[in-house]
Image (cartoon, rainbow, N blue to C red):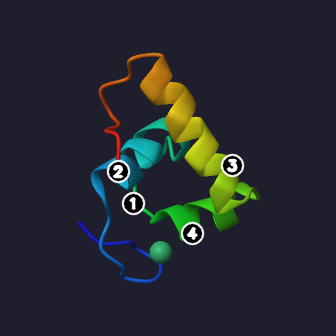
Amino acid sequence: MNCAQCGGRLSFNELGLNKKFNANGSACLCKRCLAEKLGVTCCRLDEKIEEFLESGCKLFVRA
Ligand SMILES: [Zn+2]
């Protein structure tokens, strides 16, 4: 799966982010493009991944 905006390859965690934050889900975005769309920084999304990992969410893996 590739980013609908920049064409970059999506990692497992980026797909997870799309499931969590890109709810209409029509187009999967990489972390950078998703952050832009959500109006947050990439760092913030990394923090969210960390939070989801700690809550045991199976949509994410440790890098
Ligand atoms: Zn992208």
Mark 4 close to ligand 1, CB under 8 Å: yes
Q: Secondary structure at mark 3?
A: helix
x%, y% of residue 47? 62, 41
The answer to which quarter of the image holds residue 61 is top left
Q: Are marks 1 and 3 in contact (CB under 8 Å)?
A: no
- From what the image shows, is residue 13 above or below residue 48? below
Q: Which residue lies at the image location 44% right of the left edge and 48% below the top edge?
A: 18
Front residue of this view, candidates 62 and 5: 62
Crowding at dot 2, Cα within 10 Å, few <14 / some 14-19 / many 20+, comes out as many
The residue wearing badge 3 is 44
Q: Amino acid at mark 2?
A: Leu
Marks 2/4: CA–CA distance: 12 Å
Q: Nearer the viewer, mark 3 or mark 4?
A: 3
Q: Are marks 3 and 4 in contact (CB under 8 Å)?
A: no
Q: Amino acid at mark 3?
A: Arg
Mark 1 close to ligand 1, CB under 8 Å: no
The residue wearing badge 2 is 15
Extreme-right residue of the structure: 39
Earlier in the chain: of badge 3 and badge 4, it is 4
Q: Which mark is residue 32?
A: 4
Q: Are marks 3 and 2 in contact (CB under 8 Å)?
A: no
Q: Nearer the viewer, mark 1 or mark 2?
A: 2
Earlier in the chain: of badge 3 and badge 2, it is 2
Earlier in the chain: of badge 1 and badge 2, it is 2
Crowding at dot 4, Cα within 10 Å, few <14 / some 14-19 / many 20+, comes out as some
Earlier in the chain: of badge 2 and badge 4, it is 2
Q: Which mark is residue 28?
A: 1
Marks 3/2: CA–CA distance: 16 Å
Q: Are marks 2 and 4 in contact (CB under 8 Å)?
A: no
Q: Are marks 4 and 1 in contact (CB under 8 Å)?
A: no
